[in-house]
Image: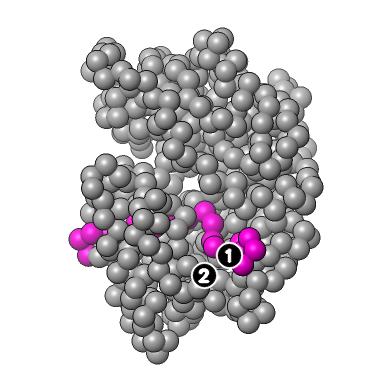
Amino acid sequence: MEFSKSLVPIACCFLFMFSCAKDESPIDGDNRPETEQIQVERDENANYLNLDSDYLFDDDKLLSFNLILSSSALDKIDADPAAEEYVEGSLSFEGETVEKVGIRYKGSIGAFVNCLSGNNFANPNGFKTCTKLSMKVRANWLDKDDTFYGLKKLQFHSMNNDNSQLRERLGYKLFREMGVPAPRSVHAKLFINGEYSGLYALVEQIDGRFTRQNYDDGTGNLYKEIWPLRDNGQPFSERDYLNALKTNEDENPSAAQMQNFAQDLASVSEADIKSVVEKWMDIEEVMSYIVVDRAIRNDDGAFHWYCNGNSCSPHNFFWYENPTDETMHLIPWDLDHAFENIRFDSNPVTPVADEWNQITNDCRPFSHGTFFLQQRSASCDKLFKAWTAFEEDYNRIAAEFKESHFSEAVVNGLIDKWSAQIRQATLEANEMHGDAITMATWDNMVAKLKSDLGHARSLL
């Protein structure tokens, strides 16, 4: 979810909780050309066909990418970014050009606020008014098996909501260091038709390639933003689970494993719930997820049960089911609002009211935050409640995290390294574009991030 640079009407902000719903929308494939017979010559010796994604996600490099579009194609997506419609273009990188890739803007309500000409916040519309918008490049535009350094899609996040320009990279890094599979993220300079657009976060796509790289058996189902249980404690229908599927869609998929997991949770007694979690989940991994998530205040994530009327559900996560050992794995997603609410609730929409193991208002929806939006305590859900039984594991992992990957020396070292890496690119963007972040603002927000992280350590 992306939040605008300035506050907007309450009605608009209420809708921000759904701002990632379109991130992997059906339009991803709707306008793909019928080109099975078209052959595009590829140099078999090209680096992008022979090197893997580690080259792109090298922590020590700041890479530059150039998107090449015809004037008509660029005019088309600039005229209506919220349509998220692909146009055909090329990708140029380190002296090699990949012809015929798909290019579009990405995001949803929060991503486009104050960046489109229209004024209907509930239905973003109009032409592009900001220099930067998040973009997606589809390397497998013509052939579903085409890749670029082993990736089928590249995601360039604008970071318009993050004046430190560090949240996603740092947040995902902390998850991964604690053994939680999470996307890789680095900074990248992005050019459009040779003109510098600015500094972006290159964030790894969570897809079948991601699951195969991160799990011993990565062939299982990947689901986006569906919790095992409804807010009434009952499983969803199989159709609901399959509608959230992001892998294996074309292989006569079954949601049986997710259904069995949900049914076990729904039917078990509170006295036996701990054994169900031990059966289905890696306790070390999920406790590490919770430790990092709460330390960085990822309040726009799975711990925030947003409510719309009487219906409540969490946000910004994936589930992966490993078919070999029949385990379930929670994957974090969309960290652009992490770190915001460490000292106080600075964001009017995202703050989670409770500690992760607390319950407010007897599990009924309640208002919280500047805009008094409705939420429900996460621990009202049976799975969240079950996790609280692993307090000893949580405390042990939190202590380890505090002394290692979350220590002042380690985290500030990363921030200093990355800040030095992107300083010149940030300055160049400011010199070129009137809406780019100023150096003074950026320096202040980097310093604030360090200070906030110090406070977060004191809370562990």
Decide which of 393, 269 is in the foreground and name it: 269
The residue located at (50%, 73%) in the rendering is 232
Q: What type is the residue that disc 1 sits on?
A: Ser
Q: What type of secondary structure mainly makes up the magenta span?
A: strand
Q: Residues within 10 Å of mark 2 (few under 14, many from 20)?
A: many
Circle 2: element type: loop
User: Is residue 52 at all visible to an observer of this figure?
Assistant: yes
Number of numbered discs overlaid on the protein picture: 2
Q: In the rendered image, which residue does mark 1 sit on?
A: 311
The residue located at (38%, 16%) in the rendering is 100
In the rendered structure, are the residues bearing label 2 and label 1 in contact, judged by CB atoms less than 8 Å apart? yes
On screen, residue 8 versus residue 225, left or right, reads: right
The residue located at (33%, 76%) in the rendering is 264
The residue located at (38%, 76%) in the rendering is 265
For the magenta stretch, what is the residue range? Answer: 305-325
Q: In the rendered image, which residue does mark 2 sit on?
A: 231
Q: What type is the residue that disc 2 sits on?
A: Asp
| Residue 348 position by quadrant | bottom right
